Amino acid sequence: MISRRRFTMMGATVAAASAVVAAPSAHASGRPGRSQGVRNIVLVHGAYADGSSWGKVIPLLQRAGMRVTAVQNPLTSLADDAAATRFALARQDGPTLLVAHSYAGTVISEVGLDDKVAGLVYVAARAPEAGEDFAALAAKFPTPPVSSGIVSSGGFRWLDQDAFLRDFANGVPREEALTLYAAQGLLSTAPPTTSVAAWHEKPSWYAVSRQDRTINPDLERFMAHRMRARTIEVNAGHLSLITHPQEISRLILGAAASV
């Protein structure tokens, strides 16, 4: 079994945290350096989004020599999303880092025991315990503002435009946020309860979004601490992968170099 480095860097500045988890080298231009560890990266998107939400992170990883695959989750059930992620894993040619944003943290927690998975990276993501009711866990923390804009119908939920722009995509330029809104993925209302929590067995990393209005930042800190994940904090909203791709790429590359 892969050993875990058990420490958490809570409340660190983005610059300091990035230095700790950065890849071994970096270009003078500020691009993330090339990792000599795991080379396969599978990116898993969350609710109200699709695989293109990783569009600013992907080229940074590719420039660093990574082989990157972005999963297109159907969001029709946890089982369906897990199947899509397992199919992406099956196409990898060796050890792979699984990276999740938001709801997709549930997905990688479910499938992360796959033999190909070398580590797990959570970006403002859910990180449930096996069998845990995430809604009940979230209820222990202040309700995030995005909740007021959730619309449910026909077995799916989505965000109205105001909540999407103001709370889900806070920090994203309005024109770009409107494009993301037009392409948002609808999430099944079926409870996504995991049967396992792979973060117990695999090395884990977490990026907390300090300005998150979709998942309470203190809930993110709680989950990261419970996982004993290596943690950074990004001064961003929920979509840090879009607004702060350099920081998120550094975290991913640092994780890939460490496992």
Image (spheres, grey):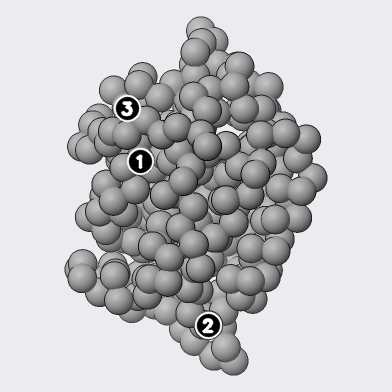
| Residue sitting at x 43%, y 65% | 130
Residue type, numbered disc 3: Ala
| Residue sitting at x 28%, y 33% | 7
| Residue sitting at x 64%, y 63% | 82
Residue type, numbered disc 1: Ala
Judged from the image, the secondary structure of the residue bearing numbered disc 2 is loop
Alpha carbon separation for disc pair 1 and 3: 13 Å
- How crowded is the residue under tag 2: few (<14 C-alpha within 10 Å), some, or many (20+)? few
Alpha carbon separation for disc pair 2 and 1: 28 Å
Residue projecting furthest to the bottom: 154
Q: Tell me the quarter of the picture where residue 3 sits.
A: top left
Vertical position of residue 82 compared to residue 54: above or below: below
Q: For residue 251, say whether it is visible.
A: yes
| Residue sitting at x 36%, y 19% | 19
Q: Which residue is mark 1?
A: 229
Vertical position of residue 55 compared to residue 109: above or below: above
Vertical position of residue 137 compared to residue 175: above or below: below
Residue 176 rendering spot, x and y as whole percentages: 54, 52
Q: Which residue is mark 3?
A: 17
Q: Which residue is mark 2?
A: 190
Q: Tell me the quarter of the picture where residue 135 sits.
A: bottom left
